[in-house]
Image (cartoon, grey):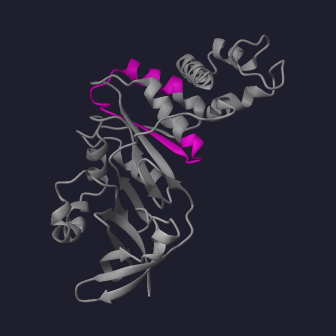
Amino acid sequence: MKKGRIIKGIAGFYYVSVSGSGIYECKAKGIFRKQNIKPLVGDHVVMEPISEEEKTGNIVDVLPRKNALIRPTVANVDQAVVIFALTSPKPNLNLLDRFLVTMEQQQIPSVICMNKMDLASAEEMDRIREAYLPTGYPLFFFSALTNEGIEPIRRQLSGKVSTVAGPSGVGKSTLINLLAPHAQMETGEISQKVQRGRHTTRHSELIRIEEDTFIFDTPGFTSLTVEADMPDLLFPEFAPFRGDCRFRGCSHRNEPGCAVKTAVQDGRISRSRYENYLRICQEMSEKKKY
């Protein structure tokens, strides 16, 4: 028996990386179906080798998970790297906030990375700083074209398992390639075995950056639905002000004496963040009517 981590799953096969032994092509034991357990990319597993020469085996146990996301289906995530462009296209801050709120719901820490700093003006960068520094999320500016700002991001990722999130065309894959230029070589071994899956829908894959540092390359987040009894808890910059509201249980929407609204007026909370909070609250209220 050997312990390893699933780095890719496709067409019923799971590719398990075992330290010091390489990558094994595995099937999951039938007992998992009976127990309604589906192994996920990122899972720590116990596998039983069938052939050391051909590097094949069976997964016999899935070890306890730290967490799991459904769309994309990945497990044991330490942090989410939310990537947007500063310009070309201009960032949709409502969408950015929805990614951040989605991670807050999952209790997964977020990191904000803004690409194309080589094309952005000082005013565009200041706008992002003013909106997101009060949140406490680590904020990085970088250029995938010039490599500027890559090393601070690498240090933020060090020793962690990260997943990337963000809209198309903002440089997610380019950043992964910059962080792990060796990735294509390491995944080549899988590609040789999985030629039948090359032209199917792209699947989640766990890529090693350094010995203890990994990043998920995923098809993307298909669900950004917010479901929370107290959505204000999903906005961390509200925390210092909640206790000063006149009414207990203040929703920070229409109540008088709201300390959060005062903080927005004083510039201590980003107005765009607050307006996106109101949009989310409105959407949740409308859903409850049906």
The answer, for residue 155, to whether it is visible in the render is no
Give yes or no for residue 109 being in the magenta stretch.
yes
Q: How many marks?
A: 0
Q: Residue at x 23, y 69 (%)?
A: 190
Image quadrant holding the C terminus, namely top right
Q: Is residue 116 above or below residue 208?
A: above
Give yes or no for residue 157 being in the magenta stretch.
no
Q: Is residue 281 above or below residue 139?
A: above
Q: Residue at x 79, y 13 (%)?
A: 257
Q: Is residue 16 above or below residue 145?
A: below
* Residue 215 on image: x %, y %: 39, 56
Image quadrant holding the N terminus, namely bottom left
Q: Residue at x 69, y 33 (%)?
A: 229
* Residue 39 on image: x %, y %: 44, 66
Q: Is residue 196 above or below residue 17?
A: above
Q: Quadrant of residue 207?
A: bottom left
Residue stretch in magenta: 103-131
Nearer to me, 206 or 264: 206
* Residue 32 on image: x %, y %: 47, 72
Q: Quadrant of residue 74?
A: bottom left
Q: Residue at x 51, y 65 (%)?
A: 36
